[in-house]
């Protein structure tokens, strides 16, 4: 897994590997010591949409939180924020002055109702929480990951490409500079983000190792088909 530097315009990448999605072999899910940071993180009540799956990541020797589809997480500590992506997008936003950052994970650009699974609402959730934690909108910079075409034969819908177009246009409209990105192509991705430093790491996974992500993406495709064929619904793309 390689680091996407803070001042880079593109992420440097490791070669695709057949590592299972989620890298469970390096995660520890045992009971944390009483009073430890991990115990405190697990004990707190999450806000609506806030990620709450905390664990110890042995490879990085760090407490970590996994952001699932529709979730976000913001912090100013040396906590590892992680997710795995197929056609979904993760936007990692960071304020270098406030030293606070966060990540979201959305499945589709738009949808019915307020849900972090949809890009517009996911971006609002993330930005609003960052502002509450001391960030300024003018100081935010972004690193963007995902949008892979991981389902063969689904190019006509191209959810990943539309997710990517949405987030890049959104960030441009909001005047948030994209300093690094690894998007599109056919690969699933595992992404790690350090909110205190703004460093991001991405690993492209072998397409054959992404069964869970393919299933997740099929759900997104089904929702896209349903929404685009419903009378009076918002046009997703």
Image: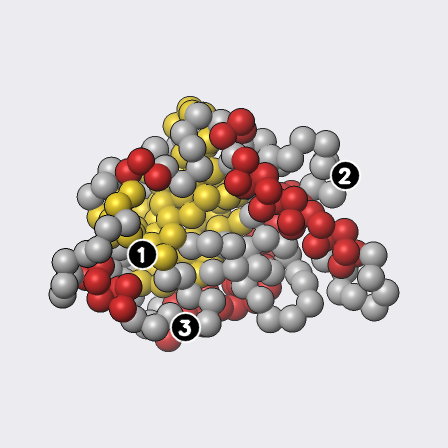
Give the residue pinned by disc 3: 47
Res 111 quadrant in image = bottom right
Which mark lies nearer to you, 3 or 2? 3
Image-based side of 208 in relation to 153, left or right: left
Residue 154 in the image: state x and y as whole percent: 72, 37
Marks 1 and 3: CB-CB under 8 Å? no
Which mark lies nearer to you, 2 or 1? 1
What's the residue at 22%, 59% (across, down)? 38
The answer to whether residue 3 is above or below residue 94 is above
**Circle 2: element type:** loop
- The label number, if any, that marks residue 54 in the structure image: 1
Residue 71 in the image: state x and y as whole percent: 47, 60
Res 228 quadrant in image = bottom right
What's the residue at 59%, 64% (across, down)? 120
Give whichever of 29, 95 is nearer the camera: 29
Q: Looking at the rendering, in which quadrant would you find the N terminus? A: top left
Q: Looking at the rendering, in which quadrant would you find the C terminus? A: bottom right
Q: Earlier in the sequence, mark 3 or mark 2?
A: 3
Image-based side of 172 in relation to 161, left or right: left
**Circle 1: element type:** strand
**Circle 3: element type:** loop
- Badge 1: few (under 14), some or many (20 or more) residues near its Cα, within 10 Å? many
**In the rendered image, is residue 7 in sight?**
no
Image-based side of 26 in relation to 71, left or right: left
- The label number, if any, that marks residue 156 in the structure image: 2
Q: Earlier in the sequence, mark 1 or mark 3?
A: 3
Distance from disc 1 to disc 3, alpha carbons, whole Å, reads 15 Å
Q: Residue furthest front?
A: 31
Residue 230 in the image: state x and y as whole percent: 82, 62
What's the residue at 72%, 57% (across, down)? 236
């Amino acid at each position: 897994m390689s680091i996407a530097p803070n001042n880079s315009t593109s992420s440097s990448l490791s070669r695709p590997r057949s590592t299972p999605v989620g890298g469970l072999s390096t995660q520890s899910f045992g009971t944390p010591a009483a009073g430890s940071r991990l115990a405190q993180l697990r004990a707190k009540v999450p806000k609506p949409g806030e990620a709450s799956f905390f664990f110890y990541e042995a490879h990085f020797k760090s407490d970590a939180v996994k952001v699932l589809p529709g979730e976000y997480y913001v912090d100013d500590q040396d906590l590892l924020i992680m997710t795995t992506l197929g056609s979904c997008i993760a936007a990692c936003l960071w304020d270098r002055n406030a030293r606070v950052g966060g990540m979201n994970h959305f499945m589709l650009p738009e949808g019915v109702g307020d849900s972090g699974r949809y890009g517009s609402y996911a971006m609002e959730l993330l930005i609003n929480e960052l502002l509450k934690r001391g960030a300024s909108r003018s100081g935010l910079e972004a690193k963007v990951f995902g949008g892979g075409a991981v389902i063969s034969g689904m190019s006509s819908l191209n959810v990943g490409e539309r997710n990517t177009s949405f987030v890049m246009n959104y960030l441009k409209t909001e005047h948030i500079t994209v300093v690094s990105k690894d998007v599109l192509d056919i690969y699933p991705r595992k992404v790690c983000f350090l909110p205190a430093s703004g460093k991001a790491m991405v690993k492209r996974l072998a397409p054959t190792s992404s069964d869970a992500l393919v299933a997740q993406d099929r759900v997104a495709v089904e929702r896209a088909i349903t929404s685009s064929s419903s009378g009076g619904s918002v046009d997703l793309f």
